[in-house]
Amino acid sequence: MLTDELRQTLIQTAIETRRWAYAPYSNYLVGAALLTSSGRIYDGINVESAAYSTTICAERVAVFKAVSEGEREFQAIAVVTENGGSPCGSCRQVLAEFGLDLLILIADIDGNLREEISLADLLPNAFTPKSLDR
Ligand SMILES: [Zn+2]
């Protein structure tokens, strides 16, 4: 269960890290903060590239940072954009790799929580590691 304090910490962390977003092409800055089951928070920002398709989203940066440090279980992720944009399909799929119970907090840069939704609801009928069982 996510406390109100943790909810605010995640949103504030995403807001603060968003300043490091590298988005010279879209100017759409995104900050993310991922809470692991061990209690650590990994932040992430979007990083764009002149070769557009190699751009990566803030959510995946946060996940990859956490996974590269041995984390595999996540409780919640806050995603902050100017207008409360929702995670893209690629990020939903990467997040699904680690469990559909993940809570997703979608907020704007003023800290307003626009939506709180489980990954299972955000990505119905997800393709997961279990899908590979034969
Ligand atoms: Zn994305």
Image: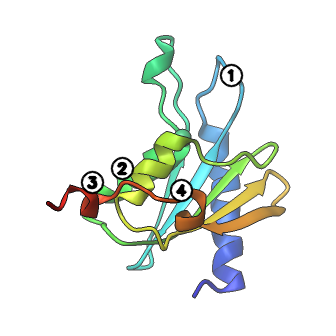
**Furthest-top residue in view?**
50
* Residue identifier under label 4: 123
The answer to whether one can see residue 45 in this image is no
Determine whether the beta carbon of the residue marked 1 sits less than 8 angstroms from the nearest atom of ligand 1: no
Q: How far apart are marks 1 and 4 (CA)?
A: 25 Å
* Residue identifier under label 3: 68
Q: Residue at x 49, y 46 (%)?
A: 91
* Residue identifier under label 2: 64
In-image side of 128 versus 100 (left or right) = left
Q: What element carries label 4?
A: loop
In-image side of 83 versus 59 (left or right) = right
Q: Earlier in the sequence, mark 2 or mark 4?
A: 2
Determine whether the beta carbon of the residue marked 4 sits less than 8 angstroms from the nearest atom of ligand 1: no
Q: Which amino acid does label 4 sit on?
A: Leu
Q: Which amino acid does label 2 sit on?
A: Phe
Q: Which of marks 1 and 4 is nearer the N terminus?
A: 1
Q: What element carries label 1?
A: loop
Ligand 1 occupies quarter: top right
Identify whether 88 is placed above or below 97. Answer: above
Q: Distance between the residues labelled 2 and 3?
A: 6 Å
Q: Are marks 2 and 1 in contact (CB under 8 Å)?
A: no
Q: How far apart are marks 2 and 4 (CA)?
A: 19 Å
Could you say which disc has been placed on residue 26 in the image?
A: 1
Question: Viewer-nearest of labels 2 and 4?
Answer: 4
Q: Which of marks 3 and 1 is nearer the N terminus?
A: 1
The answer to whether one can see residue 49 in this image is yes
In-image side of 126 versus 58 (left or right) = left
Q: Do the residues labelled 2 and 3 touch (CB within 8 Å)?
A: yes
Towards the viewer: 105 or 13 = 105
Image coords of residue 130 (percent x, y) = 26, 64
